[in-house]
Image (cartoon, rainbow, N blue to C red):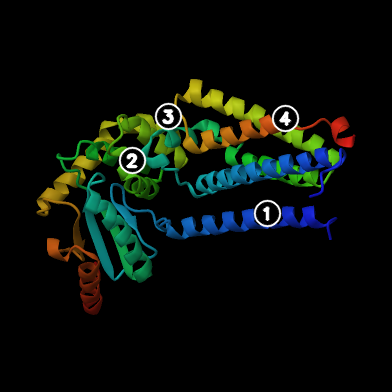
Amino acid sequence: MKKPTPNEAPARARVILYSIAALFCLCGLADATYLTVLALTGETAACGGQTGCFEVLGSAYAKVAGIPVAAFGVAGYFTAFTCAVFAAFNSARARKLFALTVGALFAATLWLLYVQAFLLHAFCRYCLFSAAITFLLMGLVVASPSPQMSRN
Amino acid sequence: MKRFLPFIIVAAVGLITFGGGFALYRSKKSSAPAAPKDAPAAGIHVRGSNVAAPLVTVEEFGDFQCPPCSMMAETLKKIETEYGERLKMIFHHFPLPVHAHAREAAIAVEAADKQGRFWEMHDLIYKEQGAWSKAPDVPSLFNSYAGTIGLDLDRFKKDVLDPAVAARVEADHELGASRGVTSTPTLFINGVALKPDETNPPGIHKAIEVALKKEPKP
């Protein structure tokens, strides 16, 4: 079997890393799309009979200027997915944009966790799932090789 | 080909997301009931596409914490869709004392009616019956439902405590008692009560068909 050359190894690592990131983005995208549809149809997420989802998704914090927060999540995850795909195909600009998008998603997630924990005193399972995805994406951004390393 | 692969992947995911979201939205919207076209008289909750001149009027005395009532709500929605403008639905509260939160639920729905959202709250409370009926803090759950359907929450909280709102529930209960209602759901088709063993989808269909053949005005 042919061993990867020193130049191929970081490239392969990059492809694997951004492919995993793209998969995480797809999970977040599905979650955010589901929540957006629920918000648009006026339905609530049952959360297996727990009260948290109703309290979170029905709160004033669930919308910004009449737009469901989940819709921003859809946009954010789709942008992150697009960047991850292009980054996997060796686009340096996409790597930068991916890190920026994930940073923005991470900041929004921290705010939403604060709202749930300290303002609403209730947690929504779907929102926590999205938060977990964002934390994983942030971990991948931190773990991703620097552009210099990729070039070498 | 490899140059276009990322574009193809992104476009495919975009289409799948949009298509899936749209399909989910449509399936949820189509299962949602139509709002009444004509404003009902105060205190009477009417639904139907032709409430002014229907051929058949179906009246229900319901309890929001009664599981068969929840199933009946689904059945009645289907029947309403099936018969369209030939049918008018009327809902009356009949909270049974045996259900700890039934009266609270009825009051919450009445409070939603003060903001013109009776049927949205009616449907949501029935739909989520399994969640709130076991919840430790039912009022806060009803508040979140109110927020979910877009009610002014401060006004809703005030209306829930308004004695006039509770009085509307009591008035419905008294009306039911005066008409011999003892259990829920109890249905009247053009004023004629269905027997308990007829209060099921085939029984309701049969009674409506009989009423349509007679074609009386309600």
Pair 3/2: label in front: 2
Dot 1 surroundings within 10 Å: few (below 14), some, or many (20 or more)? some
Give the number of the disc on residue A132. Answer: none
Pair 4/3: label in front: 4
Q: Quadrant of residue A24?
A: top right
Which mark sits nearer the N-terminus, 1 or 2? 1
Distance of label 4 from label 2 (alpha carbons): 42 Å
Distance of label 3 from label 2 (alpha carbons): 23 Å
Q: Secondary structure at mark 2?
A: helix
Q: Kindly identify which residue carries mark 1.
A: B13
Q: Secondary structure at mark 3?
A: helix
| Residue A87 visible at all | yes
Task: Pinpoint the chain carrying mark 2.
Answer: B
| Vertical order, B7 against B158 (above or below) | below
- Asked if marks 4 and 3 fall on the same chain, the answer is no
Dot 2 surroundings within 10 Å: few (below 14), some, or many (20 or more)? some
Contact between marks 3 and 2 (CB within 8 A): the answer is no
Distance of label 1 from label 3 (alpha carbons): 41 Å
Task: Kindly identify the amino acid type of the residue bearing the numbered disc 3.
Answer: Asp
- Asked if marks 1 and 4 fall on the same chain, the answer is no
Dot 4 surroundings within 10 Å: few (below 14), some, or many (20 or more)? few
Task: Pinpoint the chain carrying mark 4.
Answer: A
Pair 4/2: label in front: 4
Q: Kindly identify which residue carries mark 2.
A: B131
Task: Pinpoint the chain carrying mark 1.
Answer: B
Q: Kindly identify which residue carries mark 4.
A: A143
Q: Kindly identify which residue carries mark 3.
A: B154
